[in-house]
Image (tube, rainbow, N blue to C red):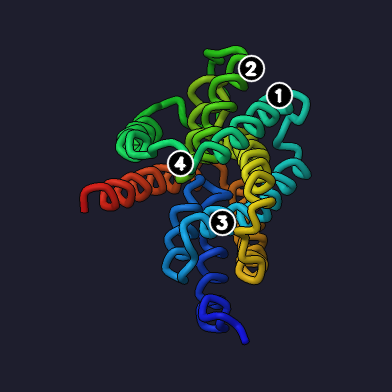
């Protein structure tokens, strides 16, 4: 007999949440802010929620990354070191998530995301045009790649937004290229955290499987829309995603 979490009604809701999360995540990041509360609402424990979320999110980020790579939007040679640094950073974050206090991050992240939203909203450089590179690619990999990966394994919401912001502000990528490359780093981060969670047996596989299908569909649609509309789509969704993530985290902290 299926547990309440695996009932048809709850799985149907989780499928729809994953569909929306995959769609939003492929465009601007922040899908975890939809899927994590939904998994907690469904009755999973916090550890099961984090583990199951990574299991289903791998499919969304993988689909989006594969689509961007297929369309020639990702320079795999240039991104390989950043992806590797992200992988190890995320693994380290996932290993430490139950040992360190996340209160400081919980207070800092909303403020950073609000700053990102304002940057994307008012910066004249956020467009389809590449701009000046401010940081060498290896240093970007060792800083943004590793530490945002660590944050994603340890805490999570908005990691894709951080990656996109880093590519735009530090490497001078346009929004379309930044979004495409951020999905590759998201995939590395999700995969690393999943591998860390896997031995503990905390993944609810029936839930993860249903949500993975939703993630696949949502990410496929979102990534295609990014390729078609570029900054005209990514910019407003990125701003809205940053503000909604910030509001949610602030509400959880002080509401």
On the question of residue 121 being in view, the answer is: no
State the CA–CA distance, disc 1 to disc 2.
Answer: 9 Å
| Helix, strand or loop for disc 4 | helix
Q: Which mark is residue 137?
A: 2
For discs 1 and 3, the disc positioned in front in the rendered view? 3
x and y, in percent, of residue 205 in the image:
66, 66
State the CA–CA distance, disc 3 to disc 4.
Answer: 26 Å
Quarter of the rendering occupied by the C terminus = bottom left
Q: Between residues 94 and 243, which one lies in front from this camera angle?
A: 94
On the question of residue 207 being in view, the answer is: yes
| Helix, strand or loop for disc 3 | helix
Mark 2, Cα crowd under 10 Å, few <14 / some 14-19 / many 20+, is some
In the depicted structure, whether residue 176 falls above or below residue 3? above
> Disc 1, disc 2: CB below 8 Å?
yes
For discs 3 and 2, the disc positioned in front in the rendered view? 3
Q: Between residues 205 and 216, which one lies in front from this camera angle?
A: 205
> Which of marks 2 and 1 precedes in the sequence?
1
Q: Which mark is residue 53?
A: 3
Residue drawn at x 54%, y 59% is 48
On the picture, is 134 further left or further right than 255? right
> Which of marks 3 and 1 precedes in the sequence?
3
Residue drawn at x 57%, y 38% is 95
> Which of marks 2 and 3 precedes in the sequence?
3
Mark 4, Cα crowd under 10 Å, few <14 / some 14-19 / many 20+, is many
- Give the residue pinned by disc 1: 81
- Give the residue pinned by disc 4: 235
For the view shown, which residue lies furthest in the bottom direction?
1
> Disc 2, disc 4: CB below 8 Å?
no
Residue drawn at x 71%, y 34% is 74
| Helix, strand or loop for disc 2 | helix
State the CA–CA distance, disc 3 to disc 2.
Answer: 30 Å
Q: Between residues 116 and 71, which one lies in front from this camera angle?
A: 116
């Amino acid at each position: 007999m299926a547990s309440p979490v695996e009932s048809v009604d709850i799985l149907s809701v989780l499928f729809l949440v994953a569909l929306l999360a995959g769609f939003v995540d492929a465009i601007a990041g922040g899908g975890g802010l939809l899927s994590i509360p939904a998994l907690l609402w469904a009755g999973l424990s916090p550890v099961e929620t984090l583990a199951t979320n990574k299991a289903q999110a791998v499919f969304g980020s993988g689909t989006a990354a594969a689509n961007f790579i297929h369309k020639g939007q990702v320079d795999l040679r240039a991104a390989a070191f950043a992806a590797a640094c992200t992988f190890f950073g995320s693994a380290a974050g996932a290993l430490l998530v139950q040992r360190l206090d996340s209160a400081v991050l919980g207070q800092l992240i909303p403020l950073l995301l609000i700053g990102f939203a304002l940057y994307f909203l008012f910066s004249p450089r956020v467009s389809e045009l590449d701009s000046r590179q401010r940081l060498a690619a290896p240093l970007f990999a060792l800083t943004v790649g590793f530490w945002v990966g660590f944050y994603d394994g340890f805490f999570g919401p908005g990691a894709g937004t951080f990656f996109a912001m880093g590519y735009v502000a530090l490497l001078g990528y346009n929004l379309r290229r930044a979004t495409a490359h951020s999905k590759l780093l998201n995939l590395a981060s999700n995969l690393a955290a999943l591998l860390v969670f896997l031995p503990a047996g905390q993944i609810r596989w029936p839930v993860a499987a249903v949500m993975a299908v939703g993630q696949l569909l949502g990410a496929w649609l979102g990534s295609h829309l990014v390729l078609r509309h570029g900054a005209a789509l990514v910019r407003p969704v990125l701003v809205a995603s940053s503000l909604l993530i910030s509001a949610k985290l602030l509400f959880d902290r002080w509401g």
